Image (tube, rainbow, N blue to C red):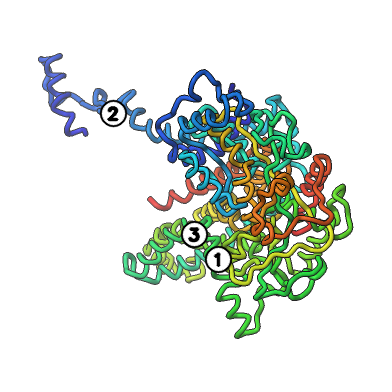
Amino acid sequence: MTVANAPVLVSGVAQAEPGRHPITEPAGPTRRSPLSGLAKYLGLAPFAVYVVIFLAIPTVLAIVTGFFTEDGSFTFSNIAGLFDPLVLGTFASSFWVSAVTAVIGSVVGALVCYALLGTRAGGALRSFIDSASSVLAQFGGVMLAFAFIAAIGSQSLLTLWLKDTLGLDIYADGVWLYQPAGLLVVYTYFQVPLMIITFLPALEGLKTQWAEANATLGGTRLTYWTKIAFPVLAPSFFGSLLLLFANAFSSYATAAALVSQGSPIVPLQIRAALVSETVLGRENMAGALALGMVVVMVVVMWGYSVLQARTSRWQK
Amino acid sequence: MFRKRTIAGIAIFAAAAITLSACSSATETPAAAGDVDAATATSAEDFGGLDALVEAAKAEGELNVIALPDNWANYGEIKAAFEEKYGITVNSADPDISSAEEIAAADNLKGQDTAPDVFDLGTAVTLASTDYFAPYQVSNWAEIPDDNKESTGLYVNDYTGSMSIGYNSNEVPEPESLDDLLGDDYKGAVALNGDPTQAGAAFAAIGLATVQQGGSLDDFQDGIDFFSELNEAGNFIPVNATPATIASGETKVVFDWSYNNLAQTSVVDGWKVTTLPGAAYTSFYNQAISADAPHPAAARLWQEFIFSAEAQNMFIVGGAYPVTIAAMNEAGTTDEDAIAAIGNLDGDIVTPTTEQAEAASALLAEKWAAAIG
């Protein structure tokens, strides 16, 4: 840009002040980006409009409904409804499912990442696992639910095989696949790959010079991990953990396809409030539940961004 | 008018609206011919007779129906028969949504040519949504018993099922009483069609369990307790029963309306339907015309068709009991083979009153999640 602009600026200055030598003139202060003023914002507009229409407006409208009754008068009763023991219970279940799958996902994912460090960077195995993880991290919803019903449902090949050959009935105490316990198994399926794609770059960022410096100064492998690698990786690890938590906390479609009874997690409570044909007049409760989820998500994502900022210090 | 419900709806049903508009027709035909205002007509007479109504409906050329699955009470054939008979295209939107969502769709699509023309609704939603309906009385109005219709024709019962138990006879023995289902033969086998705090069919299953346990519809606690026991025995499977889960064998025993269970007998080898001796639980669905119907004449012709002997017999073929069956029996227009196949609806028939249904809903909202948790 600087190069392209230079002749124009030079000639402009030259015309205005013919007495001075153009080359000696400092060009800096008068230099302007070609995308100035309004143009700069126009470039952002498509994305901004998209976010406003498909994220901001629906979120605000959904939350606002939580503060009104069905006939449009202001009320706090929906918000008060959030503290109903039943609703608190579903928030607790959502928390529990999200936290457990996030911890399992991040630990297992981190171990896989560590193992991948042993493979050649850019090699076939690492590229394959990296790209497979990118795909699997996005595999969710009805397809994933039915994949699990087909794989480990009560009539599935695997379940029946275990029962017939090993005498092991995984559903001896009832079919847990369609309960929050089942969600743990299913969510972990997409949490591990998500951890791999978010955490692998951080591990790859560990510089061999640091290990060499540690060795030169008489450090051991243990001190390398406790004094160098862990402090450097910690923000990234916990940031990824939060991301996984948020990912599970906001998942709806997979749970909706799998869990039919009792609406044990918050997104399913929102569905129940909106679509029920037997318990009527709770549509606006959905807005209050959404507000509860947004509060949790804002806190989690704020924590994520703080940790992310610390992480990026070491990735320069 | 920008109502609060509309605001909520826009966010939630944006996707639905997009889907709907994709199958809409670009052309909108003018309403009824001549100076008849189809949107306010309350009978075929207002058009100048049935033939004039048919003409007006044909001029509109389309009918938007919503929440009518092809395999539900034979609606697939009923829609096709209507199309063939009158040459009117039936646009069937969102077949699998709930009654509450039908009303939400009417709200969100108001004023668009993709808005629903007619509804098929469960009782609770019907009673809560009368503002959305336009009154209309079909030609054979007198054949519908007084208890089954709103006096001005805002809504009218159309068909009912009997709450039944479908089971895969290749896998499990026939249940002869509710308590049989607690036995070891039914491990992880018994499912509902939906969550009773959301779906009418599952709600009715709890109602049936209540009366079968000797309770009354005033208090659904007995039914809730039964399912709680079933869950503790490891026999309840909390997945939504669908034709797919029935076919795969995931749900070997399903509480559902007789017409839904009967529809599976021809599809799934060994699938049989039984109703337990003692009280039978029924609940009518309701027809209503949308007050904002984009095709008001076609909507009214649909009502004439639904309550004609032709369509009422098609309900029987689908395993449902139509509302005009007594009049049809008298006139000799009942499809005898079809009724023989599903059996007459007799014995002690129970249906919850509005008050009973509301009390049961409140109880379920409070107790259900814990009962099967």
Marks 3 and 1 on same chain: yes
Is B313 in front, or is A35?
A: B313
Q: Are marks 2 and 1 on the same chain?
A: yes
Q: Is residue B45 left or right of residue A193?
A: right
Choose top left, top right, bottom left or bottom right for residue B263. Answer: bottom right
Q: Give the SS element for disc 2.
A: loop
What amino acid is labelled 1 in the image?
Answer: Phe
Question: Where does label 2 land, which residue?
Answer: A35
Where is mark 3, residue-wise?
A195
List x then y, in percent, for residue A230.
51, 61
Q: Residue at x 84, y 60 (%)?
A: B278
Residue at 49% from the left image edge and 39% from the top image edge: B86
For the C terminus of chain B, the quadrant is bottom right
As measured in the structure, the alpha-carbon distance from the residue carrying label 3 to the one carrying label 1 is: 21 Å
Image disc number at residue A148: 1
Quadrant for residue A41, please give it: top left
